Amino acid sequence: MTSAALRSRAWKLLEMVTTPLLPSDYLDLVSPLRAGADLCGRIEAVHPETGDAATVVIRPGRGWRGHTAGQYVRIGVDVDGVRLWRAYSITSPTNRQDGRVTITVKAIPDGKVSNHLVRRAKPGTMVQLDQATGDFVLPEAKPAKVLYLTAGSGITPVMGMLRDIEFDDVVMVHCAPQPQDVIFRNELHDLVADEKLRLTEVHTDTDGMLDIARLDELVPDWAERETWACGPAGLLDAAEELWSEYGVQERLHTERFRPSIVVAGDGGEVTFSATGKTVDADGATPLLDVGEEAGVLMPSGCRMGICFGCVTPLKAGAVRDLRTGEITEAEPGVLIQTCVSAAAGPCDIER
């Protein structure tokens, strides 16, 4: 009998013993990071960065295909018995020798996953992973001059870039409320000391919000630089307007963590027909958040309208797109993105 036939017979015997489960179910318990298992990772360390931010070190399973600097990864985390998915930028370099990856998370008010990862996650905790994705990345050909324009946690994808590739002429303008709120501040200042980075910090508690027109003063040659910008919608909107005004919009690359919010209507009663739950919702809260708050199991991904991981049938009523204000009414086959849609009157979501 061949070795392949022996393995096949042995596997069938194992299936008989483990019924109704499969042998792979037990292997997942013993070796969850093995090749062939659902992609997951093990948290190996959590390093505080600021009072409300921490870097999480993750050992990914063997199915992990790596990443490109600037990309993000969707992570499934079990919080109080419910698996929730969020997207975080990868902050480790692509060539990290130990094969680990890091995400750097800023805890936001009422953020279930961010607060859990920053304040409660422990080494040994298993998380689910998707493959890295995103097009907020560096080009293959090195630009002669680079500008990074960031604010708050918008620095995280850019830090992955800084750690991955050195450029001859790099400038960063970064906004944070106070010096102690600047994530990676010590590392950034080490780069400055080594003359690998020119850094301007804008401390908004004392300096006020960055007026994009100040770039003429802070970075006189900003229009000549290939620019990567990441931060709040207001900053990115202003940057896109300025770059367009000067006719250099092709040199500006942006990453938005949250959708731009517009006036969203009056809200209404939301029915989650599959679970029988009905809740009142305002016109500005994404239906994804409404459902999660009500205890409904909601699929999700990037939470900013890019990956379509939250797409759900709209059975009745109407919703408003929080980015554009566009109304979508229910009809057969209509799907909506719950992360960027709010109730525009009573509606029924098939969850």
Image: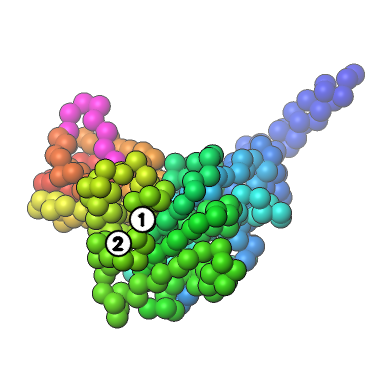
Way the structure is coloured: rainbow
Left or right of 289 in this view: 187: right
Is 144 left or right of 61, judged from the image as shown?
Answer: left
The residue wearing badge 2 is 216
110 inside magenta stretch:
no
Element marked by disc 1:
helix
Percent across and percent down for residue 170 are: 49, 58
Magenta residues, start to end: 330-338
Q: Is residue 71 left or right of residue 266?
A: right
- Residue 332 is a magenta residue: yes
Q: Identify the image quadrant of residue 66.
A: top right
- Residue contact between numbered discs 2 and 1, judged by CB atoms under 8 Å: yes
Residue 52 lies, in percent from the top left, at: 44, 73
Q: Residue at x 35, y 75 (%)?
A: 203
Q: Residue 222, which numbered label?
A: 1
Compare residues 218 and 47 and report the one nearer the observer: 218
Q: Residue at x 15, y 45 (%)?
A: 325
State the image quarter where residue 46 is shown: bottom right
Residue type of the residue flagged with mark 2: Asp
23 is higher (above) or lower (below) than 40: above
Binning the other alpha carbons within 10 Å of mark 1 as few (below 14), some (14 to 19) or many (20 upward) gives some
Kind of residue at badge 1 = Trp
